Structure formats: C-alpha cells, structure tokens
Image (cartoon, rainbow, N blue to C red):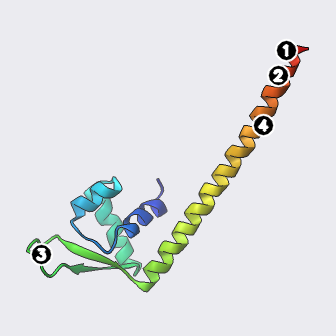
C-alpha cells in the first residue's frame, strides 16, 4: 500500500472519536505510522484534530475533514479507482492473450 492509499484509509476513518491505537488497528498500521500520517494530514490542512470534550483521556481526539480534506479524499479515491480500472484492464488483456495461446496450443495438439 502506498502513502496515498494509507492517507485514504485514515481519511475514511475521520469523524469518529477514536484513539490512535484503535485507528492504527482499523487501518492495519502501527501507532507510530498513523501518528506520522495524521501529522502530515494536519500540516497539509486536510484534517483538524479536536480533543473530544467528554473524554477524560488525553489522547482521544476527533479528526475532522476540512473542506480541502474532503476534496483531497475525493481526488485520492478517484485516482485509486482509476488505478484499479487500469489494473483490471491489463489483467483482462493478459487473460485474452492466455486464452489465445491456450486455444492455439489446443488446436496444434489436435491436428
């Protein structure tokens, strides 16, 4: 998973009151990696962190998407979809090639 995909996973989990440990478990990365990415997203202005008022835990925050963050989430998602479509098309082309090779080999053996 590349950096952009990690950011997308974290962006998808914004809006929840969640500990860094829980967020790390949900996205499948270490707490350190999640903290690093969160700081980067905050620096880019994509999210803002608000301490959850009713929480007595210091490390419990609510991460909210900014307007810029919403746009970036949409853009990253679109790039992800485009990349997956390209991968799918490439696999389909490979399958067609293998089918042709199989049919050619099958016809050669029969003759």
- 43 lies above or below 105: below
Pointers 4 and 2 in contact (C-beta within 8 Å): no
What residue appears at the point 85 percent right and 26 percent down from the top-left corner? Answer: 104
Residue 48 lies, in percent from the top left, at 32, 80
What residue appears at the point 12 percent right and 75 percent down from the top-left corner? Answer: 55
Real-space CA distance between mark 1 and mark 4, rounded to the nearest whole angstrom: 18 Å
- For the residue pair 98 and 51, the one nearer the viewer reads as 98
What residue appears at the point 30 percent right and 75 percent down from the top-left corner? Answer: 63
Q: Earlier in the sequence, mark 3 or mark 2?
A: 3
Residue highlighted by disc 1: 109
Real-space CA distance between mark 2 and mark 1, rounded to the nearest whole angstrom: 6 Å
Label 3 element class: loop
Q: Which mark is residue 97?
A: 4
- For the residue pair 28 and 106, the one nearer the viewer reads as 106
Real-space CA distance between mark 4 and mark 2, rounded to the nearest whole angstrom: 12 Å
Pointers 3 and 1 in contact (C-beta within 8 Å): no
Label 1 element class: helix
Q: Earlier in the sequence, mark 4 or mark 3?
A: 3
Residue 27 lies, in percent from the top left, at 35, 57
Real-space CA distance between mark 3 and mark 2, rounded to the nearest whole angstrom: 68 Å
Q: Is residue 62 left or right of residue 66?
A: left
Q: Which mark is residue 55?
A: 3
Pointers 2 and 1 in contact (C-beta within 8 Å): yes
Quarter occupied by residue 17: bottom left
Q: Which mark is residue 105?
A: 2
Q: Earlier in the sequence, mark 3 or mark 1?
A: 3
| Residue furthest out toward the left | 56
């Amino acid at each position: 998973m590349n950096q952009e995909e990690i950011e997308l996973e974290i962006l998808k989990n914004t809006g929840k009151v969640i500990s860094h440990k829980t967020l790390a478990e949900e996205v499948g990365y270490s707490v350190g990696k999640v903290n690093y990415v969160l700081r980067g997203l905050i620096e880019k202005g994509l999210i803002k962190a608000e301490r959850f008022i009713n929480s007595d835990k210091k490390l419990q925050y609510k991460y909210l998407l900014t307007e810029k963050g919403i746009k970036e989430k949409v853009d990253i998602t679109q790039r992800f979809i485009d990349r997956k479509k390209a991968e799918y098309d490439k696999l389909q082309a490979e399958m067609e090639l293998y089918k042709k090779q199989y049919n050619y080999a099958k016809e050669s053996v029969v003759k």
